[in-house]
Image (spheres, rainbow, N blue to C red):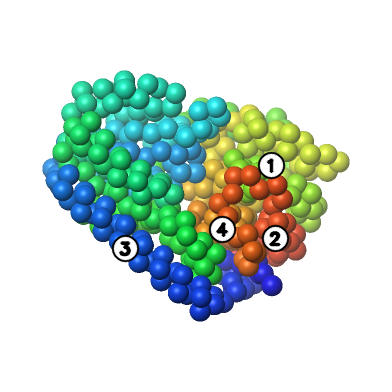
Amino acid sequence: MGTVMVMGTTTKAKTKAPAASKLQQLQVRLVRVLHWVGNLVLHWVQHLLFSSNPEARRILIFRTGSFGDSLCAIPAICSIRKQFSNAQIDILTNTGHPNRNLVSIDQVIAPGILNRIINYQNQSRRKVLQDIQKSRYDLVIQLPQYNAPWYRLLRDMVIFRFVAGIHAGFGWAWDNIPTFRQAQEAVFTAKNERLRLLEILKKNGVLPLPETTFALHWTNTDQEIAEAKIKAVLPKTDKPMIAIVAGAKRSQNRWQLTNFKAVCRQFASQFSFILLGGPDDESLAKQIQDGEPGIYSLCGQLSPMQNAWVLKKCRMVLSNDTGLMHLSYAVGAPLVALFSARDLPGRWYPPDIPSVRILRYFGLPCSACLSETCTRNVCMEKIEIAQVIDAMDDLLRNSG
């Protein structure tokens, strides 16, 4: 029988994942051996191809991914900036989804951290490489996606050394071993993405800042627009706001809309509800609002940092695993985060701080599937309304 694990510093409703069998423990040992050998080879190749350059003046960071990926990389990027305070630091990036309007790092990071953002989304790879060659970087730092295949990390080293002509570099770490994933789920919780990237820097001589270091940027105009939008949709009321993030890039990460409606009903006498998300989430918002008083939508109406301002003003955020979930804890909003079981536990978790609660179901035969085509979110269905309400009540009592 599976269990829902509720995690949080002050949460009392804690349950344990099912114990690992002896076979699973053996399988995880094999995974750890593979991990060690794979990274040892990468380390040797890095040592052969690249030198170190602690006095680098022109640095290229390579980090891909959309909103959540970018936010999770910001503590590491800030650490690099502090270590190389006088260097020009550029970033090579893309969102990985050319046909979708996803948020990239240039829309959220504060000025002064990066000098230039090279977004190669839909760009000629040849022209981008020519640009990098002309820039004459003396250090490349890769902040790899955790699921980057081993061969791709090796390929990236070869490209940066022999095609881009960069002589110093580090950061190539292999962390996704797609073997015996259910055994891995049963035995350990993975490092979250922020800590994983900071650990890569530490191993290569860069002093890591705390994982809660977020250099975000919103302007006075962002604040004014966000405030105006709130006033436009909310009636005059003294009720504090709870933000609901019902969408997600992957449908597998979405809790049922009827469940969100039930939660809103539970707290309707105490709070107003703001639905946040992108243009793709407007139809979801309408379904939650249908027949329910006190629920208002700003989906598709705000920029990322305008959303950040709204989140900061909310008493709490209830969110699926998506970019706005990461933005919530980045701005200090109390957060209840709902996770599917498609990935290993811990990978994308928020920081372990008092203002966060995490719910995830353990023990399904299809756990850690990494599926992109799941037609029934059974792992999300297993997270019960009552468990979410209990987590929210606990957070309200203990987050000040």
Alpha carbon of mark 3 to alpha carbon of mark 2: how far? 35 Å
Which one is closest to the eye, mark 4 or mark 2?
A: 4
The foreground one among 266 and 4 is 4
Q: What residue type is labelled 1?
A: Ile
Whole-number angstrom distance, CA of label 2 to CA of label 1: 22 Å
Q: Residue under label 2, please give it.
A: 383
Q: In this view, does 100 lie to the left or right of 387?
A: left
Element type where label 1 sits in the image: strand
Between disc 3 and disc 2, whose residue precedes? 3
Q: Is residue 18 left or right of residue 388?
A: left
The residue drawn where x is 45% and y is 74% is 26
Question: Which residue lies under the disc numbered 3?
Answer: 36
Return the x and y of residue 184 as percentages of the image width and height: 49, 66
Quadrant occupied by the N terminus: bottom right
For the point 44% across and 49% down, the residue is 147
Ranked by sequence position, the earlier of labels 4 and 2 is 4
Q: How crowded is mark 4: few (under 14 residues within 10 Å), some or many (20 or more)?
A: many
Is residue 74 visible in this depiction of the protein?
A: yes
Mark nearest the camera among 2 and 1 is 2
Pinpoint residue 368: horizontal percent, then vertical percent.
Answer: 56, 58
